[in-house]
Image (cartoon, grey):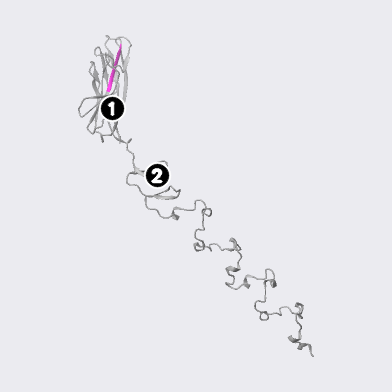
Amino acid sequence: MALTQVKTTGLADDAVTSAKIADDAVVTAAIADDAVTSAHMADDAIAAAGIADNAVVTAGINADAVTGAKIADDAIDSEHYTDGSIDTAHIADDQVTLAKMAGLARGKLIYGDSSGNPAALTVGSANQVLTADGTDVAWAAAAGGGKILQVVTATNTSNVSVTGSTYSTFITADITPTAASSKFLVLITTGVYVAESGSHTVVGFGWSMTRNIGGSSVVGLIADPLDSQGPYGHYFSPGADHHFATISTKIGFDSPNTTSTVTYLGEGRPYKDSGMSANFGSTSDSQIFIIEVDGS
């Protein structure tokens, strides 16, 4: 029998070894389905071209096997994020801009509430201010007081000479309060020349800041001290027939509690009612400054 006539039935089981198979002799059709196991594949034998499109499914990928290097740039969109998966640790500092924040009604403010959470404070009313009680913030009416409402000034360039015991006015100014609660800061300054005729061994003068409301009686605000002979706010004992000059200023604070016109005055006289003269506005002009301050 010729050797070329050997048939499958003439071969014993396991008689054909790999050495008896020619190179490239085994074709795909000669391999049974599912007959090639992973143990029969050489390491790194399957290239990308050997994998069918869409053949790799999720179940065929090990957990944590896909690294960042295997993900194409800009391939992951918001639809791929699990809801609530982005936490604070994954947001870089200064990355949340105003444009990324939820809208907030005009005029509202973000503050920390009693639970330590951010909350929106509603808009306050017109002219309200933001206040704090040491714990929370809230809108409240603006506190009054302290604001300058008006200023009145006057100057007397004339010399007012006084020789008797009667106080004479050397400067005056009127002001009409904006409100009954207003407070007033009043400053009066004057240059004074005092002369003694030779009959006294002392020389001096005194004056007061006064006011009246609507022509009523005068009320003294600030005055020099008096003794039995007269005021001695400025007093010298240089001997007979002497004189001196000075500039004297008084600052007063007043609460007239009215909206009627208030008149403020500077009134003075010499220490002695005879043999002595006090000349107010002599060495410098007499001036008055009245400042109305909101007292609410």
Percent x, y of residue 229: 26, 13
- Please identify the quadrant where the C terminus is shown: top left
Q: Which residue is mark 2?
A: 137
Question: Can residue 207 be seen in the rendering of this structure?
Answer: yes
Q: The residue under label 1 is which amino acid type?
A: Ile
> From the viewer's perspective, is residue 55 above or below residue 163?
below
Q: Is residue 51 left or right of residue 116?
A: right
Q: Nearer the viewer, mark 1 or mark 2?
A: 2
Question: Can residue 281 be seen in the rendering of this structure?
Answer: no
Question: First in sequence: mark 1 or mark 2?
Answer: 2
* Marker disc for residue 36: none
84 drawn magenta: no
Q: The residue under label 2 is which amino acid type?
A: Val
Query: How many residues crowd mark 2 within 10 Å: few (<14), some (14–19), many (20+)?
Result: some
State the extent of the magenta-drawn residues as a range: 202-208
- Report the magenta stretch's main SS: strand
Q: Image point 26% across, 27% down: which residue?
A: 155
Name which quarter of the figure residue 263 lies in: top left
Percent x, y of residue 287: 28, 26
Q: Is residue 200 left or right of residue 84?
A: left
Q: Is 44 or 10 nearer to us in this picture?
A: 10
Q: Is 261 or 187 nearer to us in this picture?
A: 261
> From the viewer's perspective, is residue 229 above or below residue 157?
above
Query: How many residues crowd mark 1 within 10 Å: few (<14), some (14–19), many (20+)?
Result: many
Dot 1 falls on a residue whose secondary structure is strand
In the rendered image, the residue lying farthest to the right is 1
Dot 2 falls on a residue whose secondary structure is strand
Q: Is residue 274 left or right of residue 54?
A: left
Q: CA distance from mark 1 to mark 2?
A: 44 Å
Name which quarter of the figure residue 226 lies in: top left
Q: Image point 27% across, 22% down: which residue?
A: 208
Q: Which residue is mark 1?
A: 288
